[in-house]
Image (cartoon, grey):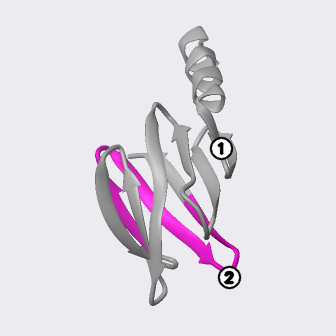
Amino acid sequence: MSLLSVVAAVMLVAGCGGQGSQTDCGLDGCTITFPRSGQAAVSVLGIEARLVGVQEGSARLEVAGQTVTVPVGGEAQAEGFTVGVERVTESDVVVRVRPF
C-alpha cells in the first residue's frame, strides 16, 4: 500500500462523526444510523448528511446540500456520492454513503 493510499484511508475513517447518530466508516464509505425522530446531522467524507424524513418506505436525505429521496434497498447520486438506504425501522434509518 502506498503512502498516499494510507493517508487517504486514515482521512476517510477519521472523517466520520456526528451528534445523535452512529457512524461506521471504512475504506469504501460510511454507514450512518440516524434516529428517526429529531434532527440528526453527521459530517462524513468531508460533507454533511442529514435525515429530512421518512415516508412510504423511502427516506428523504440531504447530502452535501442536495436533497434526494431513496427507497429502502435503493440508491441515488448526490454531489459525487452514492447514497443508499439499507433499512428503515420504527426507531432508526440506516444509510450508506460512498464516493462514486
* Image-quadrant location for residue 64: top left
The residue singled out by tag 1 in the image is: 19
In this view, the residue in front, 62 or 82, is 62
Cα distance, mark 1 to mark 2?
19 Å
The residue singled out by tag 2 in the image is: 90
Residue 69 image position (x, y, % from top left): 35, 71
Residue 66 image position (x, y, % from top left): 28, 52
On the rendered structure, is 83 left or right of 11?
left
Instruction: Determine the residue positioned at 48% across, 64% down.
Output: 84
Instruction: Determine the residue positioned at 46% across, 71% down.
Output: 53
- The region drawn magenta spans 74-95
Q: Main secondary structure of the magenta part?
A: strand
Residue 51 image position (x, y, % from top left): 49, 61
- Seen in the picture, residue 85 relative to 9 is either above or below; the reply is below
Say which mark, if any, is on residue 28: none
The N terminus lies in quadrant: top right
Instruction: Tell me, yes or no, whether the highlighted magenta stretch contains residue 94.
Output: yes
Q: Marks 2 and 1: in contact by CB < 8 Å?
A: no
Residue 17 image position (x, y, % from top left): 64, 37
Secondary structure of the residue carrying tag 1 is strand
**Is tag 1's residue or tag 2's residue first in the polypeptide sequence?**
1
10 Å crowding of disc 1: few (<14), some (14-19), many (20+): few
- Seen in the picture, residue 13 relative to 32 is either above or below; the reply is above
- Seen in the picture, residue 18 relative to 77 is either above or below; the reply is above
Instruction: Determine the residue positioned at 48% across, 54% down.
Output: 50
On the rendered structure, is 24 left or right of 98?
right
In this view, the residue in front, 2 or 64, is 64
* Image-quadrant location for residue 27: top right
Instruction: Tell me, yes or no, whether the highlighted magenta stretch contains residue 46.
Output: no
Amino acid at circle 2: Glu
Amino acid at circle 1: Gln
